Image (spheres, coloured by chain):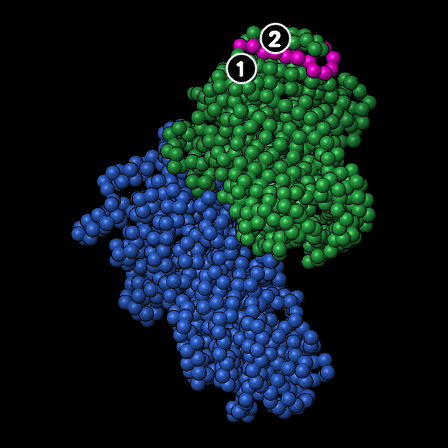
Chain colours: A blue, B green
């Protein structure tokens, strides 16, 4: 755990330069706007420890490196998130000496992430080798109001000298991935265009042939007046820059602006990229930095209005939760249904492909609760649009008749992960995608989505389950063999309770939805059934599976069993492990982990969380009491589900303890891996931990319920939820809950079991 | 299946050039001498389809390419068999046109592997572009009498022209592996020395820093007289050659000899390699081709005397079995205890590391039966010498107190394979290594080996088993969780019957052996027990495990169960699969294979084969009848064990059918993969299928038993076995068995249940 960043309600602050933590800081202070982003690298050249990283949503590379026993059915490639061309460079030279913070004395230094307005800021005072001193104030952002735009304001003031300064404004497409084998590079330059007004390079990814065009322009101001400067051009392989020289006067500030636009062939014809980029970069330069920033900050203001969580009495917790919300909004805006939520967002390149089941199981509730309905709907549409590819993926694995298996990891609907125990066996993801439809419809009441898109997906997934089971003559039951559950510390197990439960539930929900459709619109139903060749026998078969699917249980303890044979393990608790054994995924070999009872993340408990209402509280308690002590929470996704269950069961200290692990996971570098990037998808879990855990929010029968408590350490906390075209603010203080309807029509909610009507601008206050 | 090679009792013959099968032919016609070898590439340059391959025992490369989720405990590298410097080139130019069979018209062509004397021969007549015709007769071998030596006789005769011919004699260290990622090269040149008499290059492997010195010399004869020629030197990067030019006369043969020696830093100080090589290559050139060949062929004559199998009435079967024996002898000679039996020998580069459990489970019986005792003993010593590394390997996985886990794949005792389900879980290999000690002692009676070396290995392996089990409170038995059995179509299963049986047996045999030692030599016993800290409590714990280890069984069918949960599978037979599904490892995705009942190779049946005497015949029959129909035999190692069991059970047609699959596997390219190299280790299984299967050979109570039958398709077959300093020839014809003692003292054997005394030069004949 690290503790070098200053606590503040709205900002993350590095005071004093910590080069030893630079990669961590670069991750935490990353900027993004759903379309592109980059780590908090310096604008100048930096020869110290750094991980340069720029990323563009949807631009990936298919790594075909093969090792080991290549299994039939593996995808052709493992998708890599690509380090993309960089537009942020502002390279400064004074008397030919580059300004490089690793080579100067850094006298003062503050790096700051302003989460309220969404920019990265840095102020420093440095002394160069020859004794010259100067200050730098830089500020940059990736615009949320125009996702193709980035801008930097970079002010430089000589303290004890006057003279000439040389500045280069590069576009750099000579980038590489840190995780590349053999230092492979993935970009080829296609064209460059350099005019006195801009530097533009179009680069192409190898194999995937994405084109990305990066155009930059700049201006320099002294005393409020733009300097007229004729740039020289400096050209290298895959790199080009404007170079200018101007005089600076001791004590006087020069302000440099760099404007960039990044366009890709995802949105423009390849042959017109340069023209569009040229026009665009001219346009934004004309608008100017301040106006661009104002438009951008306005979007943030609105986002915070919808999704802020406040915590009184605990600055660290306040900073943590805002950081999580901030990064989630930076990663996914819901504007483009082709994109999704990468586990590292725009903060690092680890984990390859961009979409995991994290989206449906952990992120969807956040966007349901904090964004307009189109945002979570686009997350669902992403999967709907990939349905055909999911069907093809299932066909590759031998399934027929329109059965779909969604990929474990994907960039474009194709599976792009190749570890058999995950790719082929972690099929519970398919259930989470079905569940997300249910979750969305339950929350929004948007049953039209179900009829128009959802049922196609549900039927295809149900067909998968119906073919994936087999009948065990020995058990006289249907079984599901050879799976990996959410607890990835078990592989290739039989009858994972969670997976089996999801399978049964999907079949049931699909049939219910089909009957609903029949009731609503018989013609439409007939059309669908005909189009998908859905026959009575198929329904009968599904019903037979629903009635006869096997679920492992321990009759003695009266708990559900994670899988067949679980009781053969040595059943010990995490507390019995000496600290030297943890985290077990770094200390133990894989086989030892596999045969141990230790659980990486909620598995049976994930099922209880999803299907809370199917089980009574005693069942919840027995299973929580059995599994929680064996759970090591070595996935960042793990604690949030436990927080929600612990909160429900009244284990408040446990709930708070687990919450703490998630909320400042990256800011405190809890797992020693933030240098690789932030844990974006788990951040949504942190939001859930507060809203669904502490706040006890549920939607039942089209009604919002709150059943909250407040951690002893806090004075109060508040959150807002979007719910069916209303924004409701909820505040919980010691002994009371307050709710206000901030926008939308009056609404009845249930607070601690009591129905209450919320009226506009009326404060509802209830004693707890 | 291919059928382009001519059948012959002692030779493999390609008549007429088949460039479309060239890679296959190159594999089949490979030469080797236990120390080095190469594929049957042409001496001339060849621009057609070819897989150039030279290999040197013990010289490998650690590939560190990483993909996917890198598990804690994985080895640092995956060892690659390295394509090594090539000495075989004789490049011919006529009027600057290279002689290249892909660019000429090949009028006549015969390529031939002479297995009796151990050489590769080629005769061809070609027409070049300009109409010039010539014949080539080449013959080459890797000497078995001096494993550092190779030689080529290459005769060339112009048919319709006279004129100058240019010849280059290269040493080529610019080689690469076909399976390298990113075309990586693994050799760096260190030094070269070129004199008028030789070309010598020393090259070093990257990372492992092996030095290999290749020295060549040559001579040219016309009319029986050596020409005096001054060579030019041609030098390129990682390549050097002598170039000579001489005149040839129409119809007159010129004979070219190329001599090579290949020395490595495994046997010589690096700084003296060149001197040794220079002296050596001069020496062998002085000896001359014919004498070298004579010495080499003499070794083959002796090998065939010891190990030949004859089959009358079936040339294809005769050729097949001799080919298998030939390749086994080419791969491993038993002269060097650092080496072992690579799955592809010197015929290809697939499968990386060189030693698998194949050696102990499949190859040892061949060397026990056909070679002097030192040869199988060296195979055991190989593992004994790696004991410390096996202990370290187990420590990496969390085992203590001198427990050993031998690697799944190794070059030097370290694990060098990184797929968790194999590396960490295929622990039955440890049992096979213990079993090999028992098998060796049973066959040879060499109990001294057991006392001197074997017990150390047995105790370390037993300690592994004792720590690897855990006690299941649920079953009230010890269990072994998370393993992969010999049937690799199941991964991470619990209580694999075969593995559990081996574990129990190892513990039992180790304790028996300890008691034997105590009886024999109390002092030595005390020393060992003291040295290894073997305490009474450890023995008690082992006995507790022996008494309470769990074995899955099907009470209804009265068969052993391959693993827990096996009966949940859909139990169908291979015959119920339509042909389009097979081989399932090419047609099905991995998850489908895993959850199917289909068995890659003997698993429960491997246990019945190893421990035949522990079970009655009815048990054998029930289990064979249950498992054989579900076995797809998609490992080349599979059929032999089934042949032995089927033979024992009187399923003669089944036995013969399965035998056919193995014996000509490579010659007929049965699995479409011979182009990658030959299946060397499974060749020993073919020998076992005849000797232990059809011949019914067993060793019980220090006595050889034969209980033979003859396949209906054969007139007779015979084999020889080495047994305790005797050579016994056994011949089975229709209705009778004959045995003769070819060397050694008189011996009592058991033939078809009857004790018989074998006297020198007396024919024992028994009616069957």
Task: Tell whether label 1 touches label 2 (CB within 8 Å).
Answer: no
Of residues B138 and B282, the one drawn nearer to the viewer in this rendering: B138
Q: Chain of mark 1?
A: B
Based on the picture, tell me whether residue A290 belongs to the magenta stretch.
no
Does A445 appear above or below A72?
below
Q: Position of residue B42 (x, y in %)?
A: 61, 44
Residue annotated with mark 1: B709
Helix, strand, or loop for circle 1? loop
Residue annotated with mark 2: B765
Q: Residue at x 45, y 40 (%)?
A: B586
Does B611 sit left or right of A721 as displayed? right
The answer to whether residue A323 shows anywhere in this view is no
Q: Residue at x 60, y 15 (%)?
A: B731
Q: Residue furthest left?
A: A523
Q: Chain of mark 2?
A: B
Taken as a whole, is the magenta stretch helix, strand or loop?
A: strand
The range drawn in magenta is: B735-751
Q: Quadrant of residue A172?
A: bottom right
Does B383 sit left or right of B52 as displayed? right
Based on the picture, tell me whether residue B747 belongs to the magenta stretch.
yes
Local crowd size for mark 1, using a 10 Å CA cut-off: few (<14), some (14–19), many (≥20): many
Q: Quadrant of residue B433?
A: top right
Are the residues under badges 2 and 1 in a single subunit? yes
Does B21 appear above or below A651?
above
Does B616 appear above or below B572?
above
Q: Position of residue A739 (x, y in %)?
A: 37, 65
The answer to which of marks 2 and 1 sits earlier in the sequence is: 1
Helix, strand, or loop for circle 2? strand
Q: Position of residue A168 (x, y in %)?
A: 58, 81
In space, the residues marked 2 and 1 are separated at their CA atoms by 14 Å
Q: Quadrant of residue A695?
A: bottom left
């Amino acid at each position: 755990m690290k503790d070098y960043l200053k606590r503040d309600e709205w900002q993350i602050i590095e005071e004093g330069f910590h080069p030893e933590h630079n990669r961590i800081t670069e991750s935490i202070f990353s900027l993004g706007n759903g379309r592109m982003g980059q780590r908090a690298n310096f604008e100048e050249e930096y020869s110290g420890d750094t991980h340069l990283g720029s990323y563009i949503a949807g631009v990936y590379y298919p790594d075909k490196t093969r090792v080991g026993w290549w299994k039939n059915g593996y995808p052709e490639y493992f998708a890599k998130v690509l380090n993309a061309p960089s537009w942020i460079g502002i390279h400064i030279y004074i008397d030919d000496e580059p300004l490089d913070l690793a080579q100067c004395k850094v006298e003062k230094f503050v790096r700051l992430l302003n989460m309220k307005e969404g920019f990265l800021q840095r102020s420093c005072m440095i002394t160069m080798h020859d004794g010259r001193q100067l200050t730098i104030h830089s500020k940059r952002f990736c615009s949320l109001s125009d996702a193709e735009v980035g801008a930097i304001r970079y002010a430089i003031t000589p303290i004890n000298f006057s003279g000439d300064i040389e500045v280069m404004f590069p576009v750099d497409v000579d980038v590489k991935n840190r995780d590349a084998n053999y230092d492979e590079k993935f970009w080829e330059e296609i064209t460059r265009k350099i005019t006195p007004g801009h530097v533009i390079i179009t680069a192409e990814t190898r194999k995937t042939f994405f084109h990305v065009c990066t155009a930059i322009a700049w201006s320099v101001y002294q005393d409020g007046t733009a300097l007229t400067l004729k740039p020289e051009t400096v050209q290298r392989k895959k790199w080009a820059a404007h170079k200018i020289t101007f005089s600076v006067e001791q004590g006087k500030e020069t302000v440099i602006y760099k404007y960039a636009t990044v366009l890709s062939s995802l949105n423009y014809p390849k042959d017109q990229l340069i023209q569009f980029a040229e026009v665009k970069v001219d346009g934004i330069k004309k608008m100017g930095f301040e106006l661009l920033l104002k438009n951008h900050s306005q979007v943030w203001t609105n986002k915070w209005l919808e999704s802020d969580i406040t915590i009184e009495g605990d600055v660290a917790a306040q900073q943590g939760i805002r950081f999580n919300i901030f990064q989630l909004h930076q990663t996914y805006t819901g504007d483009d249904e082709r994109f999704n939520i990468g586990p590292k967002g725009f903060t690092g390149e680890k984990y390859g492909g961009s979409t995991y089941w994290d989206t449906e199981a952990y992120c969807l509730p956040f966007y349901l609760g904090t964004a307009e309905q189109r945002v979570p709907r686009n997350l669902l549409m992403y999967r709907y649009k990939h349905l055909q590819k999911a069907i093809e993926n299932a066909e590759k694995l031998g399934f027929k008749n329109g059965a779909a298996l969604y990929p474990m990891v994907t960039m474009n609907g194709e599976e792009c992960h190749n570890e058999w125990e995950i790719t082929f066996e972690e099929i519970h993801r398919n259930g989470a995608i079905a569940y997300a439809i249910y979750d969305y419809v339950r929350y929004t009441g948007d049953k039209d989505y179900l009829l128009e898109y959802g049922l196609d997906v549900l039927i295809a997934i149900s067909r998968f389950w119906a073919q994936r089971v087999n009948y065990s003559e020995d058990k006289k039951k249907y079984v599901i063999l050879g799976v990996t559950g959410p607890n990835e510390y078990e592989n290739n197990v039989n009858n994972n309770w969670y997976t089996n439960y999801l399978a049964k539930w999907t079949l049931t929900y699909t049939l219910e939805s089909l009957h609903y459709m029949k009731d609503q619109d018989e013609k439409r139903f007939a059309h669908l059934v005909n189009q998908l060749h859905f026959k009575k026998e198929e329904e009968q078969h599904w019903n037979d599976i629903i009635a006869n699917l096997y679920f492992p249980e321990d009759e003695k303890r009266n708990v559900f069993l994670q899988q067949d044979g679980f009781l053969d393990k040595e059943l010990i608790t995490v507390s019995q492990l000496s600290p030297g054994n943890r985290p077990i995924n770094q200390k133990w070999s894989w086989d030892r982990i596999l045969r141990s009872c230790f659980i990486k993340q909620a598995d049976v408990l994930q099922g209880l969380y999803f299907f809370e209402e199917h089980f009574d509280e005693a069942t919840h308690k027995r299973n929580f009491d059995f599994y929680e002590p064996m759970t090591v929470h070595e996935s960042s996704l793990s604690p949030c589900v436990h927080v929600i269950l612990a909160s429900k069961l009244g284990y408040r200290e446990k709930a708070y303890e687990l919450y703490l692990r998630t909320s400042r996971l990256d800011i405190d570098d809890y797992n020693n891996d933030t240098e690789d990037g932030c844990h974006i998808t788990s951040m949504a879990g942190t939001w859930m931990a507060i809203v669904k855990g502490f706040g006890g929010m549920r939607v039942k029968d089209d009604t919002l319920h709150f059943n909250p408590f407040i951690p002893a350490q806090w004075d109060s906390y508040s959150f807002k939820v979007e719910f069916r075209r209303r924004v409701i603010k909820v505040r919980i203080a010691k002994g009371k809950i307050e709710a206000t309807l901030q926008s939308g029509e009056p609404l009845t909610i249930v607070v601690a079991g009591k129905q209450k009507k919320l009226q506009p601008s009326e404060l509802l206050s209830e004693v707890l």
